[in-house]
Image: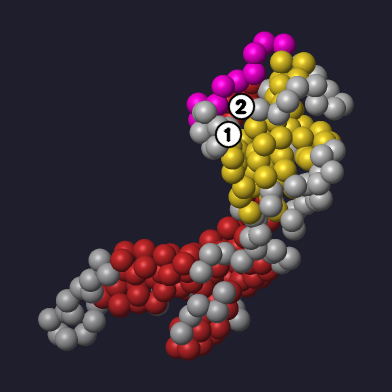
Amino acid sequence: MNEEEMHEMAFAYAIHALDDDDRQTFEAHLAECPACQRDVVQTQDAVAGLSEDLAVEPPPHLRSVVLDRVAAEASTVTPLAPRRDGRASSETRRREHRPVRWLAAAAAAVVLAGGVWGVSRTLDPDPTSQVLQAADAAEHTADTEDGPVAVVVSDAAGQAVVQLPGNFAAPQSGQVYQAWFVGPDGAARSAGLLTAETVAEGRSLLEGSPDGAVAVGLTVEPAGGSTQPTTEPFVVVPLA
């Protein structure tokens, strides 16, 4: 194994993806190679940073998908024929070693994919998506002439999202739709405004907590909204 191939094994060694023979060979090289020592330390630090304090586990199928793809690529690598004297050429030895490096690459891909997936989910700045993807998300719907209006509630997040059908009519100029959390006594508290832009987007994170509400209603209000409904609700979505 040449010097370049040794350096290529640093990442795989750092994430414990080498078999026993390759690990022993690399450790002998590592003891005398400052560059590989640095690469191993940096890789271990990076992997530890990716996995630290992740609140969301990657989906179970992620590992198998990555491994299947790498295995498919590895299957296209064929060894060269030995030399006429029966001894394997240096190129043949490099080819024979490729499956080990492919497996190392697969392990690295799984580690990085899982870490990056978890980080992206944990750091997702969009609270609307977090409610819709919450494990306890519950959808409630009400039919309208334009199609069903849905309210998705996450008790764990303490928030709700209203989703509108694609052809839902936008409010007229100078007006907005206003959402209301309605309590069991009929009292309404504002849950935010739905402007023409919001309707075009098709969904909106409602303001405040849905805790204690038995329904979400939509009314037509003057631009800027109202402190209490000034019109009868044209949509009522029961939350029971």
Question: Residue 181: where, in percent of width, then height?
Answer: 78, 40
Q: Residue furthest top?
A: 173
Instruction: Report the magenta residues as a range.
Output: 166-174
Element at label 2:
helix
Q: Amino acid at mark 2?
A: Val
Front residue (pair 10, 188):
188
Q: How many numbered tags mark residues here?
A: 2
Q: Residue furthest front?
A: 185
Q: Residue at x 66, y 41 (%)?
A: 237
Residue beneath label 2, please? 199
Q: Residue at x 71, y 66 (%)?
A: 52
167 inside magenta stretch = yes
- Sequence-first disc among 2 and 1: 1
Q: Residue furthest left?
A: 84
Cα–Cα gap, marks 2 and 1: 7 Å
Residue 198 placement: quadrant: top right
Q: Residue at x 75, y 22 (%)?
A: 231
170 inside magenta stretch = yes
- Above or below for 211 versus 63: above
- Asked whether the residues under the numbered discs 2 and 1 touch, taking CB atoms below 8 Å apart as contact, a structural biologist would say yes
* Residue 113 in the figure: left or right of residue 51: left
Question: Residue 216: where, in percent of width, then height?
Answer: 72, 39
State the predominant SS element of the stretch in magenta: loop
Front residue (pair 132, 103):
132
Question: Residue 125: where, in percent of width, then height?
Answer: 70, 45
Residue beneath label 1, please? 164
- Above or below for 164 versus 138: above
The answer to whether one can see residue 38 in this image is no
